[in-house]
Amino acid sequence: MKIIVIGGVAAGMSAAAKAKRVDKNAEIIVYERGEYISYGSCGIPYYISGITKDFNSLIQRTPEDFYKKDIKVKTNHEVIKVFPKENKLIVKNLKNGEVFEDNFDKLMVASGASAIVPPIKGKELKNVYTLKTLEDSIKLKKTLISKEIKKVAIVGGGYIGVELAESMVKLNKEVCIIEAGERVLNVFDKEISELVQEELRSKGVQIRVKEKVEELIGEEYVKAVKTSENTYNADIVIMSIGVRPNTEFLKDSGIELTEKGAVIIDNYMRTNYKNIYSAGDCAVVYHRVLKENTYIALATTANKMGKIAGENMAGGSRSFPGTLGSSMLKVMKLQAAMTGISEAQAKAKGINYETNFIKAKNHVSYYPDQTDLYIKIIYEKDTHRLLGAQTLGKDGAALRIGVFAAAIYNDMTLEEIALMDLGYTPPYATAWDAVNISAEATI
Ligand SMILES: Cc1cc2nc3c(=O)[nH]c(=O)nc-3n(C[C@H](O)[C@H](O)[C@H](O)COP(=O)(O)OP(=O)(O)OC[C@H]3O[C@@H](n4cnc5c(N)ncnc54)[C@H](O)[C@@H]3O)c2cc1C
């Protein structure tokens, strides 16, 4: 059996490695249009800030490592067309321009996503960057090293924008986040994202909300960002307004895509063609609470779903139980995390919900460094079933989200969560843990 994988990062390499483990005789070829494979994009902000010194340490395995396992990885090879009915595709060698045909028995589309650049004047100026791939981060890092680069404008205050703002502060740059929405980090509800904003501002990050970027000004190099309200000087601009699936090459192929271009798959990672699979940032993911397909670009799901696709391509029948969109990030001294749905999502979905927002403590008062731990919960009004949770604090906030994720996954109610037997010792928790308290204080 011959398996071709398009894309060599989280979903693609998870699929290739698993397929080979399940079927040792399978011939596996990975086409990756970039230079690097199998790296942790999530570590990019820490490479930019200098906490992670060498970008090579973000790379888990090289093409040579995979060749040793009999998986042929071809970097600088872009798949430009897929013909599902004929089980063939067209590949372009980006080094020498050669275009050739290859065929497959099973195909895995793991082409990920690219940063969105809005169609504004000046977007092609020098020192305007996006940050999605390892190549992007190497280029950006080279520019940032220059002492001439003092003012950094980050367009978009989502996860990546906020993480990058921290990296820029660490590099002693003046940083301004320009966000079109009402606040940064607006996948979180207001209670949490406003605390994040306060933290960023207290560390010198300028935040401009409700301002839409209209133009980038400069001749050869960018000099300023013009928004709907103001003009801000900038030596460098980083566009981080979101990502869109890399699926242009599938248009007209017959593989079903959503309106926004994400590959439609089922819980076995199968597309509408029974021998073509997909997963990761290029595909939809089933949401366990919303009970519908969503588009959430996260490494956690890309890795798991990629592995499932690999197993199934090699003859398995494992299914993915759905995402909760669980995610976390570090913002200066704060940890923020969320799982399940936000209040905004519950409202949009027409769910009969209630919420509670509490302030608890990370551990007992008589042990040093006690800090506040904020928790917001979203639950079904009639059943008290937990639908979502968000946490924020200086210590113990990020990993506590895992308890809420397990509770949502298992349809637990507030009454059950309140009395769940969580561990306690003074340096790490309180006898009623903050998670228990969030539920007990609500019922
Ligand atoms: C700065 C940053 C921080 C992040 N932090 C986190 C985090 O903390 N937690 C988290 O869960 N997620 C995080 N993410 C998201 C996470 O990195 C992605 O969800 C994950 O990389 C998706 O993996 P993927 O394999 O689906 O896609 P990608 O990583 O996008 O890889 C797809 C690959 O396919 C290649 N490709 C595309 N089209 C073709 C083609 N036609 N032919 C050949 N090759 C092609 C691309 O070059 C690319 O290398 C972060 C992302 C970034 C950029």
Image: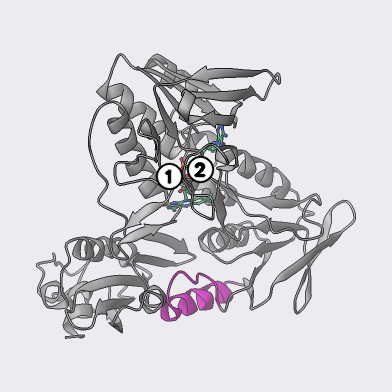
- Asked where in the image residue 20 lies, by quadrant, the reply is top left
**Residue with the mark numbered 1:** 280
* Dot placed on the residue nearer the N-terminal end, 2 or 1: 2
Rendered location of residue 260, percent (x, y): 54, 55
| Residue 329, above or below 212 | above
Report the residue at 54% width, 25% height from top.
89
- How many numbered dots are placed on residues in this image? 2
| Residue 63, above or below 441 | above
223 or 259: which is nearer to us? 259
Beta carbon of the mark 1 residue lies under 8 A of ligand 1: yes
Tell me, yes or no, whether the highlighted magenta stretch contains residue 271: no
The Cα atoms of the two marked residues, 2 and 1, are separated by: 6 Å
Report the residue at 38% width, 45% height from top.
265
Q: Amino acid at mark 1?
A: Gly
Question: Does residue 104 appear to the left or right of 126 in the view shown?
Answer: left
**Residue with the mark numbered 2:** 112
Which residues are the magenta region? 183-203
Are the residues tagged 2 and 1 within 8 Å (C-beta)?
yes
- Asked where in the image residue 218 lies, by quadrant, the reply is bottom right
Rendered location of residue 358, percent (x, y): 30, 83
Task: Looking at this view, name the residue that lies furthest to the right.
Answer: 219
Report the residue at 57% width, 79% height from top.
182
| Residue 389, above or below 26 | below
Would residue 367 be visible to someone looking at this image? Answer: no
85 or 82: which is nearer to us? 85
